[in-house]
Amino acid sequence: MSWLREYVRTDATADQIAERLSIATAEVNGFERRGVPGDLSLFRVGHVLEAEKHPNADRLQLTKVDVGEERPYQIVCGAWNFGAGAKVAVALPGATLPSGLTLDRRKLRGETSEGMILAEDEIDLGTDHDGIMVLDDALRPGTPLADVLPLVDEVLDVEATGNRPDLLSIYGIAREVAALFDGELVPLDESEPARAGDEPVDIRIEDPEGCPRYVGRLFRDVAIGASSVWL
């Protein structure tokens, strides 16, 4: 739903969109809420004030993190891709992760850890667990993390009918939702990425009798400025 709302402006809820699509357009096979359960206020932007090696563990960092309260929180962390000064995603004691784990204050190798500094896989934003997420330096400590990252999202499983191939794209569904709810459809960016010369497609026919003609065409992805060759 967060992706859909990038392209259509409507006050309709996910339930309303699912119901109207099912009646007027296509089959909605499922509706799922993904992400962080429970109290989102316990997930915040943190500013790392101190970060040093844990006195009793070579592979752990002992940090002091400003989370917008009167005192900093002490958090033990196993990642080393950040240091003092970084803005990070923090789950405070009492927060429940998508895995079902509820955090509390506990001792780790003799030092109290008050919460967790988060990697993306710990809040279902991806699969990366190589390091914690380093956020924009401009963010203020204590900012609700839900204002910065999509901690919770709703997912519709839409099955397009055979005569509606336009619904196989997110923009096609956005166009349909705009029509159903009299919403504002956000125009696509149709600007052309810069060309790197003529960019010819290299095709060689090694067996003219077996393959007298073979055609290629270059497509550019406007969203990321990349090129793809279709043969």
Image: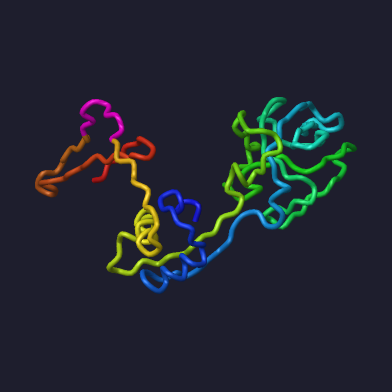
Q: Which residues are magenta?
A: 192-200
Residue at 82% across, 49% down: 104
Q: Quadrant of residue 141?
A: top right
**Closer to the camera in the image, 191 or 231:** 191
**Residue 200 coordinates in the image, percent (x, y):** 21, 32
Q: Is residue 196 magenta?
A: yes
Residue at 44% across, 48% down: 6
Count up the numbered dots: 0
Above or below, comparing residue 213 to residue 50 in the picture: below
Left or right position of 47 against 5: right
**Closer to the camera in the image, 203 or 27:** 27
Left or right position of 39 against 70: left
Above or below, comparing residue 80 to residue 214 in the picture: above
**Closer to the camera in the image, 200 or 67:** 67
Q: Main secondary structure of the magenta part?
A: loop
Left or right position of 76 against 206: right
Residue at 16% across, 45% down: 214
Q: Is residue 185 magenta?
A: no
**Residue 218 coordinates in the image, percent (x, y):** 24, 39
Above or below, comparing residue 147 to residue 32 in the picture: above
